[in-house]
């Protein structure tokens, strides 16, 4: 009988250990899900970009372009081992030849500028975060020139468009271009009227722009001439698209069961901090139950919502 009791105690101990391990495994997975996932825009894959855009309530569509080869374009002749950095001056000169002179507002000529040292606005959505840079900006020439000398942090505010350059041997990155457009719309005075051009100035041409407050259009081209023509048209109409904003709330019936996400609302950073504290309290209670403690562990002050800077954002 004593041997049977020992075996029963041993089995119960094994079961309890298994339960503890299962609980800890679940906690590890949940904490991992809560961890920030950070990726540079230049390395962002399409899955990462799509996840971040979904957190920001943004969608995109790849739209076919009706184009015929019309007119010659002097493409940039990439050298066999020429890098993106080495080819940038030549690409910039080629774009200036094809696009400039160009004015959206009278007596306010635009120009292309090297902005590789000007950081785009950081994007954050849910647990996803991304930072990055672009290569060129098209904008009001005198304003950008003045900002580059005296107000470097304001350079990208004057950007009507961003240009991401690749070599003839590198592929355009859809994730990178999408994130650059969204980030540019945060910084630029043109807001959602900003345009992104991805190109190698030879055979790869792609335009991205907002068509609605939460909808992005991606337009790939075979011919650079048509792409640059549409690029200029989009820049010209940027002021109209800058007015794209979320629609006002529709009238709500008194007996409606509200789901805030249906009206374009998303959790704030403060809401997320509160949710994290709530989750940690549940974990503490679960641990107290597993280990048969009379009192559950207490979430420390530093881990509470009110101790997080995000709570006040």
Image (cartoon, helix red, strand yellow):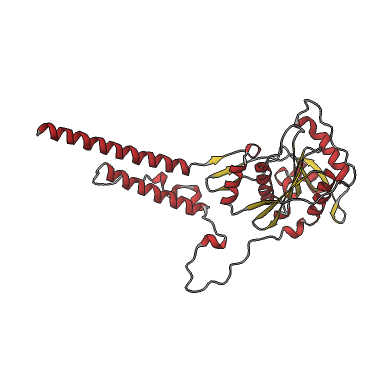
- Judge by depth and name the residue closer to the eye, 154 or 63: 63
Regarding residue 141, the answer to whether it shows in the image is: no
Q: Position of residue 39 (x, y in %)?
A: 59, 39
- Quarter of the N terminus within the rendering: top left
Name the residue rendered at 85%, 45% in the picture.
225
Q: Residue furthest bottom?
A: 254
Counting from the top left corner in percent of width and height, residue 43 is at 63, 36
Measuring 37% from the left and 44% from the top, which residue is drawn there? Answer: 300
| Of the pair 300 and 268, the residue shown nearer to us | 268
Based on the displayed image, in which of its 4 quarters is residue 73 positioned? top right
Residue 89 visible in rendering: yes
**Residue depicted at 43% across the width and 41% down the height:** 29
- Residue ranking furthest to the left: 1
Residue 207 location (% of width, % of height):
75, 47
Using the image as rendered, state which of residue 168 and residue 30 is in the foreground.
168
Residue 221 on image: x %, y %? 78, 45
Residue 60 placement, left or right of 282 = right
């Amino acid at each position: 009988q004593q041997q049977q009791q020992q075996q029963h105690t041993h089995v119960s101990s094994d079961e309890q250990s298994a339960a503890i391990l299962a609980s800890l495994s679940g906690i590890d997975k949940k904490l991992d899900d809560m961890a920030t996932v950070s990726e540079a825009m230049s390395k962002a894959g399409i899955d990462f970009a799509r996840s971040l855009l979904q957190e920001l309530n943004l969608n995109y569509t790849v739209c076919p372009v009706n184009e015929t080869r019309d007119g010659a374009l002097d493409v940039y002749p990439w050298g066999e081992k020429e890098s993106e950095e080495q080819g940038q001056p030549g690409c910039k000169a080629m774009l200036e030849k094809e696009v400039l002179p160009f004015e959206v507002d009278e007596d306010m000529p635009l120009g292309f500028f090297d902005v590789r040292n000007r950081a785009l606005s950081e994007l954050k959505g849910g647990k996803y975060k991304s930072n990055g840079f672009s290569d060129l900006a098209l904008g009001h020439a005198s304003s950008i020139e003045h900002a580059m000398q005296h107000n470097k942090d304001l350079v990208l505010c004057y950007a009507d468009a961003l240009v991401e350059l690749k070599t003839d041997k590198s592929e355009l990155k859809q994730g990178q271009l999408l994130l650059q457009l969204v980030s540019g719309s945060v910084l630029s005075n043109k807001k959602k009227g900003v345009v992104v051009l991805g190109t190698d100035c030879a055979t790869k041409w792609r335009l991205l722009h907002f068509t609605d407050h939460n909808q992005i259009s991606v337009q790939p081209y075979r011919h650079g001439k048509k792409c640059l023509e549409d690029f200029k048209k989009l820049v010209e109409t940027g002021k109209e698209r800058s007015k794209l904003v979320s629609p006002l709330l529709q009238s709500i019936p008194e007996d409606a069961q509200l789901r805030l996400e249906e009206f374009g609302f998303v959790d704030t950073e403060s809401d997320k901090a509160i949710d994290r504290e709530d989750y940690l309290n549940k974990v503490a209670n679960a641990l107290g139950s597993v280990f048969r403690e009379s009192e559950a562990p207490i979430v420390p002050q530093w881990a509470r919502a009110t101790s997080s800077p995000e709570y006040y954002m």
